[in-house]
Image: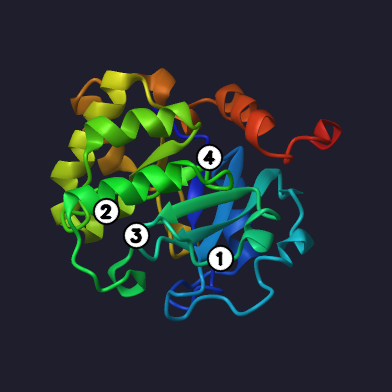
Amino acid sequence: MKLIADLHTHTSFSTHAYSTPEEMIRRAGELGLYAIALTDHGYTMPGSPGAWYFGNMIEIPHHLHGVTVLRGAEANVCDYNGTLDIPEDELKKLDWVVASVHDVCMTKEPPTVEACTRMWLSVAQNPYVRVIGHSGSPTYRYDYETVIPEFGRQGKLVEINAHSFAVRADFIPNCRQIALTCKKYGVPVVVDSDAHFSAHIAECDQALDMLRAIDFPEELILNAQEERLKAYLRQYTCVLEDESTL
């Protein structure tokens, strides 16, 4: 299986990543990808982009080096009400928002399955969120049977994050269970690298191996087929409004 897009990546505007936006886009072109999403961290993450960064992403072309470019963000979920750390007036200007939980950005109130279930159900209602990012944390475990079908009903994509297989080994059993639950309910996923350097774009072998091992349906992997991704972009974004440029 070959991925045609990487929809969660970081640039040097997240100061723990090391390639510029153009370097990331150029590398995606070299790999023959149809699309890349640039999704730097929201404001509560240490070393995140400065003020005006997300609002000014309009300066980045939607089509560059033969690649469709999604202007995006990885917004941090900050509390169990599902609050994100990027203001609505900035979120609405973006093409692609990944919502994720990071310890350093979360309230210090102790997590429970009930609280995390409430949190993700709230995020599912956010009209600007497209992707539920690396949600396999054992600390922030939620009720998959309750929440994942709601992600599907709200048009959210559940991410299978390849970076978790390298740096978050304790996530892996939950990632498998999340994938199995998506398979059970027919909820689409995206497989992303979460690359922090251009050389790692589309490096998703371990995540794809896990999906093969559970016989996950290829038709539920949004970024495994170009027309499938285009249909989603037409429904939920304005990226392809001028298709004469493609």
Q: Which residue is mark 1?
A: 86
Q: What residue is shown with label 2? A: 164
Task: Please rate how many residues cluster around mark 4, counting C-alpha atoms within 10 Å: few if below 14, some from 14 to 19, many from 20.
Answer: many
Rendered residue at 66%/72% (across/down): 53
Q: How many marks?
A: 4
Which amino acid, by three-letter code, is at mark 3? Answer: Val
Judging by the rendered image, the residue that carries numbered circle 4 is: 5
Dot 2 crowding, Cα within 10 Å, few <14, some 14–19, many 20+: many
What amino acid type should be assigned to the residue bearing mark 2?
A: Ser
Dot label at residue 101: 3
Q: Residue drawn 62% across and 55% down?
A: 25
Q: Is residue 142 above or below residue 52?
A: above
Q: Is residue 169 above or below residue 105?
A: above
Expressed as whole percent of the image width and height from the top left, the position of residue 74 reads 49, 59
> Pointers 3 and 4 in contact (CB under 8 A)?
no
Of circles 1 and 2, the one toward us is: 1
Q: Residues within 10 Å of mark 3 (few under 14, many from 20)?
A: many
Would residue 134 be visible to someone looking at this image?
no
Spatial CA span between label 1 and label 2: 24 Å
